[in-house]
């Protein structure tokens, strides 16, 4: 049986931050010793010394497989921290280490995402009952990666997790696999604990504006033209921004809405799924979507609606609490869009949002919580795996 | 014709579409404007949080108990508050004209020296400033390879330069770190000031702590010595008491049988025998005097605790009455000046001055006329009483020994005594936290005793 322990810190010294987190996570009287930890999942913001983090983690938890990624902010039980040096960890222990499977790869890109993900999923083994994915947030074709995992396991295997990010600059993001720091990597963690199930919730709170643009020229996830014009310059012009803008600072406003099948509208609490643009080719004005975007696809400029964000969050939490029912929570993983962090909310609102998520789930119980502000979220809708952007996605691991 | 118009204000369809597109454009453009406003609002919120963090830095800084932890706390707090990857804090030594690097953060690839030569007279700025703006500092800190950095001078409470902090980024850091904004200077100055006061406060505390430690060590040593002294005093008193009691019993026997011999058999003895008997009787008497003195010496320990206001002139009146016979016989002159009232144990003071007067009378040649002068000398902190005589005087080299028990400087028969009188005087004075000493210009020049007692 898998047991989870979490902690987060804003300590800027990387060695001390990791020590502090491990010590705090394992402070409960029934916690295992660091030497017994089997898996260490870490989220770090971009300013930390990654080698020091990994080395310290390995020294303190020598038997643990270490996985993780960078993010724009860490969300723990202690709240959110989007400083340049924030760290959050989830430690996992099991008397049966085979309940934890880990696979990783380097150089995952749009064109090979299916194969890379499939091969990793095969390594996990067919008896895993859920898969956590941490992948590069800039280069991956997330829908292909989902298909690859499903091809190796099964169509309804719950996939959860997110893509890494930097501090919203969309320059580089990193993934961690034991002592390795990868820049275009992906990691799959398979849990094979038969006593565990997962309940998910997702919401974005944005609304489309007016008429859509139409993708008139694209290859896979690369969009060259919308409405017969160079895609990125047109979008920037519409948003009143310089045409040569870097995608990073535009993320909070450049989200594109894509119409969802009607059957998912109620489940999603919205008719549109959002796509973030984190990579642009300034030479030809094309941009990269995180999923395939065939010609003829309608894309809406969207606008965030604060009321919808808060009310939608309430509805999402209500649904999750109903989903979980009487079952006991083992841990909560959480991915949130980097654009929903300090780019959108001040500290008071952010704290309020996190409290509204955490209070119904962890309440008085000491439920471990590890979250990050990343570039994208993997969350199921109606039992089907989807990749999202601009959402809050919660993954509650519950005991059957 | 009608198809080209709709019911909204008679606009053509194309015009309506155009209007909608323009409207959508305007709405779309407001998204980035709105985001810009959110950005400004959030920047203000972050600025507010930054000042909260600076407050927190000040509060936590007070609890740093070593210069190392002060250094760590300072650089890490600056890194956190200003979100920069590198920071260095240094303390200025005006004596050595150099900066001592207390701590640094993020310079893993560089070797940071312990000291950097620096002359504060070239630093005129009191506020935070960009490193690149100051040629002198830019040259000094070139080894840090910082491209964009702020410097905050530390000033003490008198406004004197006491150190500095540098926080910033190298060119390679620009990938993820935003350039330092000119607006950051204000918060940087505020935090640097706080750091400067913390450093000053820490140094003061450190000094105080050291003084307290030294005092505690001295007190401990004094206490140990006092305990030793008390123990040895007690041992001595106990010893004196036991010895005198143990000696008194056999002495009584000798004295009793000698007196019996004297009363019953004196006539049976020849002249020599009678002379020997006299020696025995005189010796026994002297021995008894010594034992009585010893007993007295060992008994007057607790008496000093019972104090009252003592009129010294009255004491000397009593003493003169006690010595009336000797004074008359020797035609001694005792002049007593105007003496103060002293808060002390009356009986002990009586004994103290009685011993001194007795000494003065005793150590005057039988042929001469003793002249004793008692007066008070001016002294701010203590009562200083002087007892001078025109007696035989004391050689300078023996002055220090006269208060040692049984140390008789003059062994001649002319000057009888048991050698404990001055020891008792010293003991009485010390029991009153005072001092006693003697002065003499030499043999035949008289002696002056000084008694100093606290006011």
Image (cartoon, coloured by chain):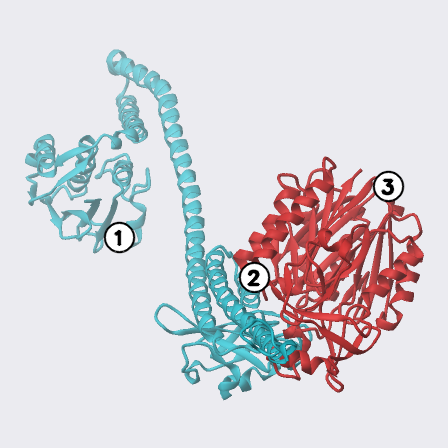
| The quarter of the displayed image where residue B80 is located | bottom right
Q: Residue at x 92, y 58 (%)?
A: A151
Residue marked by disc 2: A345
| Badges 1 and 3, same chain | no
* Residue B87 located left or right of residue A31: left
* Residue B440 located left or right of residue A225: left
Subunit bearing disc 3: A
* Residue B222 located left or right of residue A298: left
Tell me the distance, in whole angstroms, between the alpha carbons under discs 1 and 2.
Answer: 96 Å
For label 2, the crowd category at 10 Å Cα-Cα, with few meaning under 14, some 14 to 19 and many 20 or more, is many
- Between label 1 and label 2, give the one nearer the viewer: 2
Residue B187 appears in the figure: yes
On the image, the x and y values in percent for residue B68 come to 56, 62
- Between label 1 and label 3, give the one nearer the viewer: 3
**SS type, badge 2:** loop
**SS type, badge 3:** loop
Q: Residue at x 67, y 72 (%)?
A: B108
Of the pair B401 and B276, the residue shown nearer to us = B401
Q: Are marks 1 and 2 in contact (CB under 8 Å)?
A: no
Give the quadrant of the N terminus of chain A. Answer: top right
The disc, 2 or 3, on the residue closer to the chain's N-terminal end is: 3
Give the quadrant of the C terminus of chain A. Answer: top right
| Badges 1 and 2, same chain | no
Residue marked by disc 3: A194
Tell me the distance, in whole angstroms, between the alpha carbons under discs 2 and 3.
Answer: 39 Å
């Amino acid at each position: 049986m898998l047991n989870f322990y979490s902690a987060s810190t804003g300590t800027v010294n990387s060695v001390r931050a990791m020590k502090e987190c491990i010590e705090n996570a394992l402070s409960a009287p029934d916690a295992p010793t660091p030497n017994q930890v089997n898996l260490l999942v870490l989220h770090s913001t971009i300013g930390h010394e990654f080698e020091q983090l990994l080395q310290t983690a390995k020294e303190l938890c020598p038997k643990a497989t270490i996985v993780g990624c960078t993010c724009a902010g860490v969300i723990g039980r202690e709240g959110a921290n989007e400083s340049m040096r924030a760290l959050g960890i989830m430690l996992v222990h099991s008397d049966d280490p085979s309940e934890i499977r880990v696979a990783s790869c380097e150089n995952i890109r749009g064109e090979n995402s299916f194969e890379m993900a499939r091969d990793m999923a095969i390594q996990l083994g067919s008896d895993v009952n859920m898969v956590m994915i941490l992948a590069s947030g800039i280069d991956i074709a997330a829908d292909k990666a989902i298909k690859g995992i499903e091809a190796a396991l099964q169509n309804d295997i719950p996939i959860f997790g997110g893509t890494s990010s930097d501090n919203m600059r969309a320059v580089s993001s990193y993934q961690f696999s034991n002592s390795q720091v990868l820049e275009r990597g992906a990691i799959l963690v398979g849990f094979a604990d038969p006593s565990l199930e997962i309940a998910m919730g997702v919401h974005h709170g944005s609304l489309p504006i007016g008429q859509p643009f139409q993708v008139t020229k694209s290859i896979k996830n690369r969009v060259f033209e919308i409405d017969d014009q160079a895609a990125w310059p047109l979008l920037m012009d519409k948003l009143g921004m310089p045409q040569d803008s870097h995608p990073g600072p535009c993320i909070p406003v450049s989200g594109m809405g894509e119409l969802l099948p009607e059957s998912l509208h109620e489940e999603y609490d919205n008719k549109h799924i959002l796509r973030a643009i984190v990579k642009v080719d300034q030479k030809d004005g094309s941009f990269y979507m995180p999923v395939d975007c065939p010609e003829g696809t309608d894309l809406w400029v969207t606008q965030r609606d604060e009321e919808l964000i808060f009310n939608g969050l309430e509805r999402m939490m209500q649904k999750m609490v109903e989903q979980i029912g009487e079952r006991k929570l083992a841990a909560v993983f959480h991915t949130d869009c980097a654009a929903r962090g300090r780019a959108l909310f001040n500290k008071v609102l952010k704290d309020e949002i996190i409290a509204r998520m955490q209070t119904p789930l962890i309440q008085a119980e000491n439920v471990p919580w590890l979250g990050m502000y990343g570039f994208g979220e993997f969350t199921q809708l109606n039992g089907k795996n989807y990749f999202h952007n601009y959402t809050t996605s919660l993954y509650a691991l519950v005991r059957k | 014709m009608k198809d080209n118009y709709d019911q909204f204000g008679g606009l053509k369809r194309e015009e309506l579409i155009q209007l909608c597109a323009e409207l959508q454009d305007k709405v779309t453009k407001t998204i980035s404007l709105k985001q810009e406003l959110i950005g400004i609002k959030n920047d203000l919120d972050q600025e507010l949080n930054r000042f909260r963090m600076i407050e927190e830095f000040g509060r936590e800084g007070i609890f740093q108990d070593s210069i190392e932890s002060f250094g760590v706390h300072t650089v890490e707090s600056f890194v956190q508050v200003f979100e920069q990857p590198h920071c260095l804090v240094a303390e200025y030594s005006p004596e050595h004209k150099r900066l001592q690097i207390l701590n640094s953060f993020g310079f893993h690839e560089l070797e940071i020296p312990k000291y950097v030569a620096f002359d504060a007279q070239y630093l005129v700025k009191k506020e935070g400033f960009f490193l690149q703006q100051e040629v002198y500092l830019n040259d000094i800190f070139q080894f840090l390879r910082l491209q964009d950095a702020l410097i905050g001078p530390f000033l003490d409470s008198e406004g004197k330069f006491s150190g500095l902090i540098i926080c910033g980024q190298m060119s390679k850091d620009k990938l993820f770190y935003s350039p330092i904004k000119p607006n950051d200077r204000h918060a940087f100055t505020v935090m640097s000031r706080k750091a400067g006061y913390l450093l000053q406060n820490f140094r003061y505390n450190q000094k105080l702590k050291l003084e307290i430690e030294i005092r505690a060590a001295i007190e401990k040593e004094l206490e140990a010595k006092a305990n030793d002294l008390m123990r040895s005093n007690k041992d001595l008193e106990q010893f004196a008491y036991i010895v005198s009691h143990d000696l008194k019993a056999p002495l009584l026997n000798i004295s009793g049988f000698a007196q019996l011999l004297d009363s019953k058999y004196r006539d049976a003895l020849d002249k020599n025998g009678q002379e020997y008997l006299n020696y025995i009787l005189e010796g026994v008497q002297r021995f008894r005097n010594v034992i009585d003195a010893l007993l007295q010496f060992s008994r007057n320990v607790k008496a000093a605790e019972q104090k009252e206001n003592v009129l010294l002139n009255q004491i000397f009146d009593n003493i003169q009455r006690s010595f009336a016979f000797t004074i008359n016989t020797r035609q001694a002159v005792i002049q007593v000046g105007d003496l103060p009232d002293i808060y002390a144990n009356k009986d002990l003071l009586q004994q103290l001055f009685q011993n001194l007067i007795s000494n003065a009378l005793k150590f005057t040649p039988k042929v001469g006329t003793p002249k004793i002068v008692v007066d008070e000398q001016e002294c701010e902190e203590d009562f200083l009483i002087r007892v001078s005589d025109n007696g035989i005087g004391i050689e300078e080299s023996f002055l220090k020994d006269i208060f040692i028990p049984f140390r008789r400087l003059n062994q001649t028969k002319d000057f009888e005594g048991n050698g404990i009188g001055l020891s008792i005087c010293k003991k009485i004075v010390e029991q009153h936290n005072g001092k006693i000493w003697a002065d003499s210009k030499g043999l035949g020049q008289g002696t002056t005793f000084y008694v100093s007692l606290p006011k």
